[in-house]
Image: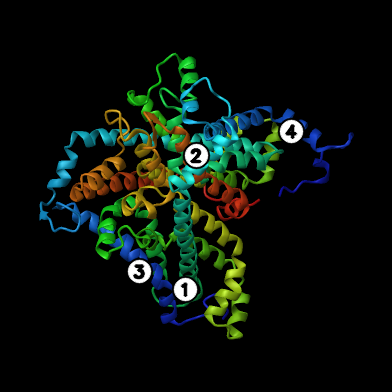
């Protein structure tokens, strides 16, 4: 929050309302407001149009002069068809479970690793930290071919083990928890030690409650990145019933009605796989943004 | 002596670190190292032993004309997305920084694409910009006078992929830049306002140098993203075409490894992709080291 001296405040000759505040700000920065409004419109319009197409029949999508909603019954039929006949409900549940497990696992592993690095005095502490940090320089694409081979060898191909276990450890998580743990007052740690608080109780009773906000922010980051995964599930999973939701959009490309491609259903699938992430982002945005360094 | 290292059991520390270390060793470092090794073998199929061919496959990929095209396309794509994302997110976050009302609303309206899966962006754009039924295609043709058909025009397909990427990568950069802008000391802003310095000059000569550590961080991350990203959008919207115009290195790697099952050739491409990206990322860090202004 900005610190302002008394004399900085605009003299209130007229009753200040939200509206006059807004007008004053608009007059002061007309260019910024206009530019932000335009940018927002450009970024949001495609999704608005996508939503519109999910209410139309395939024939209406093909009719370029038809640019209004096709009707609630059509929309319901579209969403029902994609959710049930094209299995998007199943795909969404699969992805929810996979992303949920990866997120919780990632948080637990990061918590434990960061606790060892910050609160334990042992040889190889720095080495362990650099071992973890260096993984940030090893992108997924350098290891994808042997990783696939390994998954096949382990018998994890076409199972959820193959899309979760290899991604449980996260350097970002360890790094963020390490920062937070280092900010915990030494006195508190000292008191716990003198009181004979064991590591498990220390973790569960002190560390976990103290890092709640960051945990939910990290959770959002991990959940979104797993939910949005496309490349790895595409090659690691073959059976349609076990697949993740983004790859489902590939199945929908072959949806045909006679000679027409059912673009309305493709849009419906896109909206279904986008909405949960948008809700998550909006609901937990404060924690997410704080975790990413933006104090609100 | 009071210290944060309250516990000294090496065994316990190792136990907490073990899950993270095991996952990273087994699924990250080991496959990454094996990639280089696999490049020396000509392998028929996953899981089968291959013939040692030394650097033959590395040379083969280097002299492969189709791959040359992929490298050029990828460099163009990385350049456009890195510069585009940075410039756009600097402007957006600066505009939000300058206004005093509606900050949160503008922020939400511009950062939400962070939650958008690449596959969703691809699906939405490929339908809205479809040459015959796209709702945005007719306006584009009327406005520019050109024929819009990304299925035959390589340049248009390239821009579809690049702008689509820009759309869903912008939010991430904007979040970090907002944090950086709002970390600038208030007094600086006040002084400039009193002196009547134009905002855009402040941005270029004062603000940007002050947030240069964040800019470098994003530049490096975006560069890596430029080489490893864009897969979903190419796979769903253009399939690398037309005539290789969007055949990114990552997409060629996927085709070699997972469509033609040429493991050796795919591994070689992983190595090249890694080398190019890491050389550029490290180069950026080294070159900018002298110009970066750490701490305010």
Secondary structure at badge 1 equals: helix
Circle 1 sits on which residue?
A: A116
Q: Position of residue B46 (x, y in %)?
A: 20, 55
Q: CB of mark 1 within 8 Å of CB of mark 4?
A: no
Q: CB of mark 2 within 8 Å of CB of mark 1?
A: no
- Distance between mark 3 and mark 4 Cα atoms: 55 Å
- Distance between mark 1 and mark 4 Cα atoms: 50 Å
Circle 4 sits on which residue?
A: A25
Residue at figure coordinates x 46%, y 40% from the top left: B120
Which chain contains the residue that carries disc 3?
B
Say whether disc 2 or disc 1 marks the residue closer to the N-terminus: 1
The reply to the same-chain question for discs 3 and 4 is: no
| Mark closer to the observer (3, 4) | 3
Circle 3 sits on which residue?
A: B22
Label 2: how many Cα within 10 Å (few below 14, some 14–19, many 20+): many
| Mark closer to the observer (3, 1) | 3
Secondary structure at badge 3 equals: helix
The reply to the same-chain question for discs 3 and 1 is: no
The quadrant where residue B30 appears = bottom left
- B88 or A130: which is nearer to us? B88
- Distance between mark 2 and mark 3 Cα atoms: 41 Å
Secondary structure at badge 4 equals: helix
Label 3: how many Cα within 10 Å (few below 14, some 14–19, many 20+): few
Label 4: how many Cα within 10 Å (few below 14, some 14–19, many 20+): some
């Amino acid at each position: 929050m900005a610190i302002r001296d008394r004399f900085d405040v605009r003299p209130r000759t007229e009753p200040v309302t939200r509206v006059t505040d807004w007008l004053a700000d608009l007059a002061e920065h007309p260019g910024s407001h206009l530019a932000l409004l335009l940018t927002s419109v450009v970024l949001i319009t495609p999704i608005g149009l996508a939503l519109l197409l999910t209410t139309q029949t395939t024939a209406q999508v093909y009719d370029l002069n038809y640019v209004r909603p096709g009707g609630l019954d059509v929309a319901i039929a579209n969403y029902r068809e994609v959710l049930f006949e094209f299995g998007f409900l199943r795909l969404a549940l699969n992805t929810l479970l996979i992303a949920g497990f990866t997120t919780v696992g990632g948080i637990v592993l990061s918590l434990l690793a960061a606790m060892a690095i910050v609160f334990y005095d042992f040889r190889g502490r720095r080495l362990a930290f650099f071992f973890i940090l260096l993984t940030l320089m090893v992108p997924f694409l350098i290891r994808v071919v042997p990783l696939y081979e390994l998954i096949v060898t382990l018998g994890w191909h076409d199972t959820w083990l193959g899309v979760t276990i290899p991604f449980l450890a996260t350097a970002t998580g360890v790094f963020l928890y390490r920062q937070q743990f280092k900010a915990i007052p030494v006195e508190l740690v000292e008191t716990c030690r003198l009181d004979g608080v064991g590591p498990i109780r220390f973790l569960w009773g002190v560390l976990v409650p103290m890092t709640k906000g960051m945990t939910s922010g990290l959770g959002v980051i991990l959940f979104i990145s797993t939910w949005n995964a496309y490349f790895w599930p595409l090659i690691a999973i073959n059976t349609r019933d076990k697949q993740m939701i983004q790859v489902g959009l590939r199945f929908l490309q072959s949806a045909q009605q006679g000679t027409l491609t059912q673009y309305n259903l493709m849009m419906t699938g896109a909206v279904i796989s986008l909405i949960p992430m948008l809700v998550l982002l909006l609901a937990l945005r404060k924690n997410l943004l704080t975790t990413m360094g933006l104090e609100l | 002596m009071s210290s944060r290292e309250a516990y000294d059991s090496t065994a316990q520390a190792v136990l907490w670190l073990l899950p993270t270390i095991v996952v990273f060793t087994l699924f990250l470092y080991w496959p990454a190292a094996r990639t280089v090794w696999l490049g020396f073998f000509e392998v028929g199929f996953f899981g089968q032993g291959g013939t040692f061919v030394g650097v033959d496959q590395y040379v083969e990929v280097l002299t492969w004309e189709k791959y040359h095209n992929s490298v050029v396309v990828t460099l163009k794509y990385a350049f456009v997305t890195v510069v585009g994302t940075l410039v756009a997110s600097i402007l957006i976050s600066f505009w939000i920084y300058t206004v005093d009302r509606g900050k949160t609303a503008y922020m939400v309206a511009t950062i939400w694409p962070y939650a958008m899966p690449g596959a969703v962006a691809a699906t939405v754009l490929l339908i809205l910009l479809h040459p015959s039924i796209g709702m945005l295609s007719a306006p584009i043709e009327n406005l520019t006078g050109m024929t819009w058909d990304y299925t035959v025009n390589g340049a248009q397909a390239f821009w579809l992929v690049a702008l689509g990427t820009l759309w869903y990568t912008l939010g991430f950069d904007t979040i970090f830049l907002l944090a950086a802008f709002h970390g600038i000391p208030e007094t600086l802003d006040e002084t400039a306002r009193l002196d009547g310095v134009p905002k855009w000059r402040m941005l270029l000569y004062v603000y940007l140098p002050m947030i240069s550590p964040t800019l470098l961080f994003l530049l490096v991350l975006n560069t890596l993203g430029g080489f490893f990203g864009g897969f979903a959008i190419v796979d769903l919207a253009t399939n690398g075409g037309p005539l290789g115009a969007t055949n990114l290195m990552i997409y060629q790697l996927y085709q070699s490894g997972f469509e033609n099952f040429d493991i050796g050739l795919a591994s070689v491409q992983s190595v090249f992709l890694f080398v190019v990206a890491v050389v550029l990322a490290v180069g950026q860090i080294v070159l900018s080291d002298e110009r970066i202004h750490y701490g305010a």
